[in-house]
Image (cartoon, grey):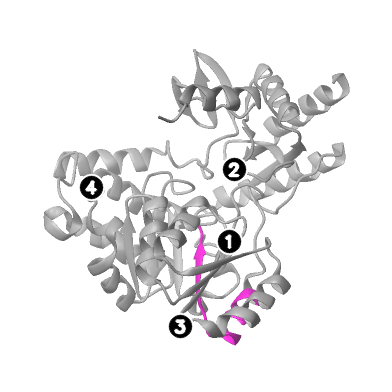
């Protein structure tokens, strides 16, 4: 039998042991543990919509009208009109012909990739893509290659060597990477996709609601909507609710309804969640000031962190402070928590060995005044260590 105790002791020894912490509640950019208040830099509620009164009211109304659960899968009796309304709005929002709602980003990625690609096909995936993408590729049975992060020369070398050996080909990237906060060279990647006869899939989980003229994401911002076949994203981050979606052609959604196991064999999302998702999409259009303020403050914080001398990356609301050593990262996290900032250490295997970091996930509620105080605290901790 597997020695669980030895495994856990080894994790503890190497500062890699993880636990679940029970928060009292979270509200307006703050989180409370044991009734102590912290500024929360671990949340993906980028636009501060999770506590928005309109989302709460929409969820409440739907629960009163439809009950608390969908009570069946979409292919049985769980596909209510409100689910289809959300999918129509997503398709319009993303500039695609059709859309399909999934219960989570993880279920979307593993189901879509494993349904659309199989043995005899090939997939090229950025090395820093999310674990759900990797798992979906493994389930598909397709041959796959991981190219060095954002390295187009590396990708093209692989395409030249391998593309011709396989029937169908997919290139996958995120548009905002969750641990580095950076973005791909998407236009050049699309050019490679077309040059080598591939399809393209992008995961906009951390970009939806924040980038683009209408808040649709990086694909919209770069004018590539008609050139990217599969656009995935979530409702559980900037949109303030829960669930995920795929925006694509009608033929693809109809195919997935008939083949995608993670869609077919899951109970549909509750109407209260679906209603909140619809309202979240409406708020992206009604309150664009949220994403404008967020990105302005994120740019300010990143610049100030660099001035102190820290290694950081990206151009989004996700700002990594890369410290390298695990023990140093854990210590710095604890010190910031002592000063009232909830920012957690990110360690291998989530990030590569030697790149442990603090991941500052900024939200609309993190004003410049809060960030100025945080920067001063970081500077003081550096001087005292």
Work out whether residue 312 can be spotted. yes
Q: Position of residue 96 (x, y in %)?
A: 40, 73
Q: Quick check: marks 3 and 1 in contact, CB under 8 Å?
A: no
Side of 175 where 107 appears, left or right: left
* Separation (CA) of disc 3 from disc 2: 32 Å
Q: Which residue is mark 2?
A: 350
Q: Quick check: marks 4 and 1 in contact, CB under 8 Å?
A: no
Q: Which residue is mark 4?
A: 271
Which one is in front, 153 or 339?
A: 153
Q: Which residue is mark 3?
A: 167
Label 1 neighbourhood size at 10 Å, few (<14), some (14-19), many (20+)?
A: many
Q: Position of residue 62 (x, y in %)?
A: 21, 44
Label 4 neighbourhood size at 10 Å, few (<14), some (14-19), many (20+)?
A: many
Tally the marks.
4
Side of 79 where 335 appears, left or right: right
Q: Which residue is mark 1?
A: 175
Magenta range is 188-204
């Amino acid at each position: 039998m597997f020695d669980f105790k030895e495994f856990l002791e080894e994790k503890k020894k190497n500062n890699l042991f993880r636990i679940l912490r029970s928060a009292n509640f979270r509200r307006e950019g703050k989180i409370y543990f044991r009734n102590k208040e912290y500024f929360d830099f671990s949340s993906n509620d980028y636009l501060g919509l999770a506590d928005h009164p309109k989302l709460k009211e929409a969820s409440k109304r739907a629960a009163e009208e439809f009950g608390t659960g969908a009570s069946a899968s979409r292919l049985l009796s769980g596909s209510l009109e409100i689910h289809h309304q959300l999918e129509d709005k997503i398709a319009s929002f993303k500039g695609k012909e059709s859309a399909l709602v999934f219960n989570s980003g993880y279920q979307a990625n593993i189901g879509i990739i494993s349904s659309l690609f199989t043995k005899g096909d090939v997939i090229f995936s950025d090395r820093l893509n999310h674990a759900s993408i990797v798992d979906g590729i493994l389930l598909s049975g397709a041959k796959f290659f991981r190219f060095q992060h954002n390295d187009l020369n590396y990708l093209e070398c692989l395409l030249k060597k391998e593309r011709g050996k396989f029937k169908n080909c997919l290139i996958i990237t995120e548009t905002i990477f969750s641990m580095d906060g950076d973005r791909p060279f998407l236009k050049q990647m699309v050019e490679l996709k077309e040059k080598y006869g591939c399809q393209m899939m992008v995961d906009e989980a951390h970009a939806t609601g924040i980038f683009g003229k209408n808040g649709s994401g990086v694909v919209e911002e770069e004018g590539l909507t008609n050139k990217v076949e599969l656009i995935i994203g979530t409702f559980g981050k900037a949109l303030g609710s829960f669930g995920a979606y795929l925006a694509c052609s009608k033929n693809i959604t109809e195919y997935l309804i008939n083949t995608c196991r993670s869609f077919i064999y899951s109970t549909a999302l509750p109407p209260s969640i679906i209603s909140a998702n619809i309202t979240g999409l409406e708020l992206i259009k009604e309150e664009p000031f949220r994403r404008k303020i967020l990105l302005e403050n994120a740019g300010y914080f990143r610049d100030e962190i660099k001035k102190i001398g820290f290694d950081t990356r990206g151009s989004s609301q996700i700002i990594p402070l890369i410290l390298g050593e695990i023990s140093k990262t854990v210590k710095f996290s604890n010190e910031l928590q002592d000063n009232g900032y909830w920012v957690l250490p990110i360690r291998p295997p989530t990030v590569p060995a030697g790149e442990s970091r603090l991941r500052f996930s900024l939200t609309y509620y993190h004003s410049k005044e809060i960030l100025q105080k945080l920067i001063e605290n970081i500077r003081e901790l550096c001087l005292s260590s």
